[in-house]
Image (cartoon, rainbow, N blue to C red):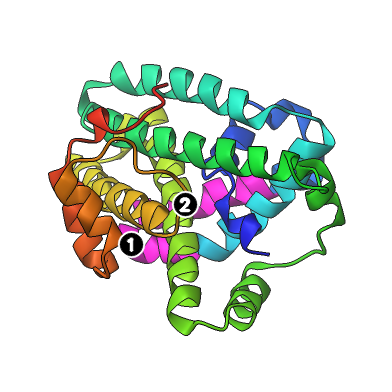
């Protein structure tokens, strides 16, 4: 069951853009509702961390349905992620008010692509293909998944780390969706909202990278000696985040968009 939470973390936005015309009415309705709830929350002034947490359930539930659809239609997720990243970041780079978000989200996409590639490769070498895995997976919602995750991992500390990882991955999804919303309607949002989103994106990216490495979801590519030592130690997630913040991401991400 843990595999579910490790797949692509921008699926909802891709459904809203690249694949919207291809999906059925039911899936479109879920995508549209998420967009409405997100826009309403931002405009009403809900703090971004609180709004992201409030939307975790909706984002997770849509992500699971989306993954079934993707594999049913034999879409190359890794290649689609690359194409999506190039297009999205190009648009973001041309928007001066949002320019500072570009490098942050690029780093998140690079990490996400490594995770996807590794997990799909792992499942291709197993007896269960990714497509079969999702077709045979029982329907499960966010609350049920959290409960099952806690029950299926005897080590409470490790279970909590995977739950934290899931929440951070949902925050990544939220960040991309919110960035796209603001980018499409810049005149509706004050500079303070963009500043808040940039800060939230940076914190989320750092947490994302730290926990991904701590949980072994991505390799540590040619790290500095001090950084390698940190990830081999018993440092807390907060300490790992600080280590990641002090490192240069661009020199350690092995796959560039």
Q: Is residue 222 left or right of residue 136?
A: left
| 141, above or below 118, in the image | below
Q: Which residues are magenta?
A: 30-54
The label shown at residue 204 is: none
186 or 106, nearer to the observer: 106
Magenta segment's dominant SS is helix
Residue 46 visible here: no
Mark 1 / mark 2, whichever is N-terminal: 2
Q: Nearer the viewer, mark 1 or mark 2?
A: 1
Foreground pick, 214 / 145:
214
Q: Position of residue 53 (x, y in %)?
A: 43, 66
Relative to 84, is 158 above or below? below
Element class at badge 1: helix
Residue 86 percent location from the top left of the image: 45, 18
Q: Give the left or right position of residue 96, taking residue 22 as reference.
A: left
How many residues crowd around disc 1 within 10 Å: few (fewer than 14), some, or many (20 or more)? Answer: some
Left or right of 47 in this view: 130 = right
For label 2, the SS is helix
Name the residue tied to disc 1: 49
Residue at the location (65% across, 56% down)? 4
Q: Nearer the viewer, residue 114 or 225?
A: 225
Q: Is residue 18 magenta?
A: no
What residue did someone put label 2 on?
38
Q: Tell me what residue is drawn at x 27 percent, y 50 percent.
A: 206
| x and y percentages locating residue 124 in the rendered image | 74, 39
* Residue located 64% across and 36% down the image: 15
């Amino acid at each position: 069951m843990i595999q579910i939470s490790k797949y692509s973390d921008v699926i909802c936005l891709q459904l809203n853009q690249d694949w919207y015309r291809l999906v059925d009415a039911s899936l479109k309705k879920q995508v549209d509702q998420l967009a409405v709830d997100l826009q309403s929350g931002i405009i009403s002034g809900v703090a971004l961390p609180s709004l992201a947490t409030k939307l975790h359930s909706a984002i997770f539930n849509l992500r699971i349905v989306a993954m079934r659809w993707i594999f049913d239609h034999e879409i190359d997720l890794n290649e689609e992620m690359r194409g999506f990243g190039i297009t999205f970041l190009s648009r973001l780079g041309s928007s001066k008010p949002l320019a500072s978000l570009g490098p942050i989200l690029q780093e998140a996409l690079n990490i996400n692509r490594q995770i996807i590639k590794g997990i799909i490769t792992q499942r291709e070498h197993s007896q269960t293909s990714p497509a079969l895995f999702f077709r045979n997976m029982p329907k499960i919602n966010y609350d049920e998944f959290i409960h099952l995750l806690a029950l299926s991992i005897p080590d409470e500390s490790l279970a909590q780390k995977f739950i934290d990882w899931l929440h951070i991955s949902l925050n990544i999804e939220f960040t991309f969706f919110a960035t796209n919303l603001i980018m499409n309607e810049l005149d509706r949002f004050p500079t303070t909202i963009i500043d808040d989103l940039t800060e939230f994106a940076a914190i989320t990216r750092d947490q994302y990278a730290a926990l991904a490495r701590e949980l072994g979801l991505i390799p540590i590519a040619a790290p500095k000696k001090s950084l390698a030592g940190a990830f081999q130690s018993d440092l807390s997630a907060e300490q790992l985040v600080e280590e990641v913040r002090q490192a240069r991401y661009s020199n350690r991400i092995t796959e560039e968009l």
